């Protein structure tokens, strides 16, 4: 009897092992379409997409992940079509600009392909466009910055450097306005810096010429903060108390860690979220777990006390 039970146990273990092996060997192809590394945050997106893709393919021998980068909506639409012709089972896409890409995304989804949308949502963001939406909290990114200014310098005269005229920029701006609501904070000006350090440098130069007194600068992106700090230093201005930006770049996190008075805090908006979306998409196929819906990442305020938890010196961003 004991031998019979032992035999059944071995057989059961072999069956389970066979199922696991079959699951590991399951053939799945995932296309990842992301913006080209044209500034710091998107370079982080590319880095994490390629890093996580490699790890997941090592973990799942039947998995093939194809990563394509594109500099603009037109070329990204072509990249999505190219991925579609390769027979992908899922598309993970962080759009350069979401609304111009809606039709290309819907065409893929209409063929039964699983779609995970990352970060930049179109005006209509529902299950007609995607199965999964993974993003940072854009409203909270702005609100967190605004509340810090409201608490720290409630009578500050502030200049704002926005990103690009797309929906997530407006979400961040709306959050910021909510954050400073009820305070004596005065907004002197708002201009677009295109999430680019050179453009932000030029905008900040313009602000420094126009306004003899500026207390605080809010810019939506750590890359733009680099240009802002350069402009302030070149102008020799000492009236500006601090700059608050967002993303969680290693350069800005290091400044927070070191107690740099010009960068006392930062707001987290990690480019690694593309890796989160990819992990969840793979879980849909190999883990057979429900991953549909919306997954939102907190906009954490990075301070000197917690900065070490968010500092990754080997990251390109």
Image (spheres, rainbow, N blue to C red):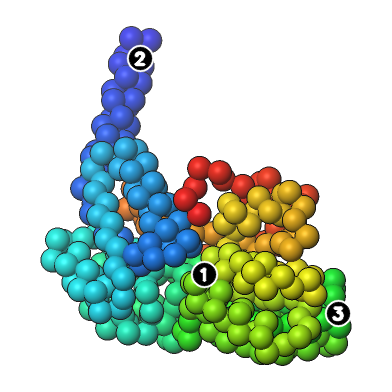
Q: Which residue is mark 1?
A: 197
The secondary structure type at the circle numbered 3 is: loop
Q: Residue at x 37, y 73 (%)?
A: 95
The secondary structure type at the circle numbered 2 is: helix
Q: Nearer the viewer, residue 34 or 134?
A: 34
Quarter of the figure with residue 187: bottom right
Q: CA distance from mark 2 to mark 3?
A: 74 Å
Q: Nearer the viewer, residue 255 or 282?
A: 255
**Label disc, if present, on residue 6 of the rendered structure:** 2
Question: Is residue 69 shown to the viewer in this render?
Answer: yes
Residue 38 lies, in percent from the top left, at 39, 66
Q: Residue at x 61, y 85 (%)?
A: 206
Q: Residue at x 45, y 56 (%)?
A: 44
Q: CA distance from mark 1 to mark 3?
A: 27 Å
The secondary structure type at the circle numbered 1 is: helix
Q: Residue furthest left?
A: 85
Looking at the rendered image, the quarter that the N terminus falls into is top left
Question: Is residue 306 shown to the viewer in this render?
Answer: no
Check disc 1: other Cα within 10 Å, few if <14, some if 14-19, many if 20+.
many
Q: Nearer the viewer, residue 35 or 122?
A: 35
Q: Which residue is mark 3?
A: 154
Q: Is residue 212 above or below residue 242?
A: below
């Amino acid at each position: 009897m004991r031998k019979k039970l032992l035999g059944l146990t071995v057989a059961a273990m072999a069956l389970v092992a066979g199922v696991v092996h079959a699951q590991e060997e399951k053939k799945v192809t995932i296309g990842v379409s992301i913006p080209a590394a044209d500034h710091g945050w998107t370079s982080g997106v590319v880095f994490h997409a390629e890093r996580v893709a490699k790890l997941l393919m090592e973990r799942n021998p039947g998995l093939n992940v194809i990563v394509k980068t594109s500099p603009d909506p037109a070329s990204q639409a072509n990249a999505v079509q190219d991925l579609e012709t390769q027979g992908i089972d899922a598309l993970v896409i962080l759009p350069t600009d979401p609304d111009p890409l809606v039709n290309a995304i819907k065409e893929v989804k209409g063929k039964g392909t699983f779609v995970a949308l990352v970060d930049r949502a179109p005006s209509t963001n529902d299950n007609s466009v995607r199965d999964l939406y993974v993003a940072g909290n854009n409203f909270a990114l702005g609100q967190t910055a605004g509340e810090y200014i409201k608490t720290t310098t409630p009578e500050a005269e502030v200049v704002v450097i926005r990103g690009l005229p797309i929906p997530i920029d407006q979400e961040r701006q709306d959050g910021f306005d909510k954050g400073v609501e009820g305070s004596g904070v005065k907004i002197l000006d708002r201009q677009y810096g295109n999430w680019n350090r050179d453009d932000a440098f030029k905008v900040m130069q313009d602000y420094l010429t126009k306004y003899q007194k500026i207390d605080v600068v809010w810019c939506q992106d750590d890359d733009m903060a680099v240009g802002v700090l350069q402009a302030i230093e070149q102008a020799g201005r000492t009236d500006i108390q601090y700059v608050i930006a967002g993303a969680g770049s290693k350069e800005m996190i290091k400044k927070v860690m070191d107690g740099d008075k010009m960068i006392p805090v930062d707001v987290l908006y990690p480019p690694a979220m593309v890796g989160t979306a990819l992990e969840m998409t793979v879980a849909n196929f190999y883990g057979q777990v429900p991953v549909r819906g919306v997954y939102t990442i907190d906009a954490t305020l990075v301070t000197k006390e917690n900065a070490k938890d968010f500092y990754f010196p080997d990251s390109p961003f």
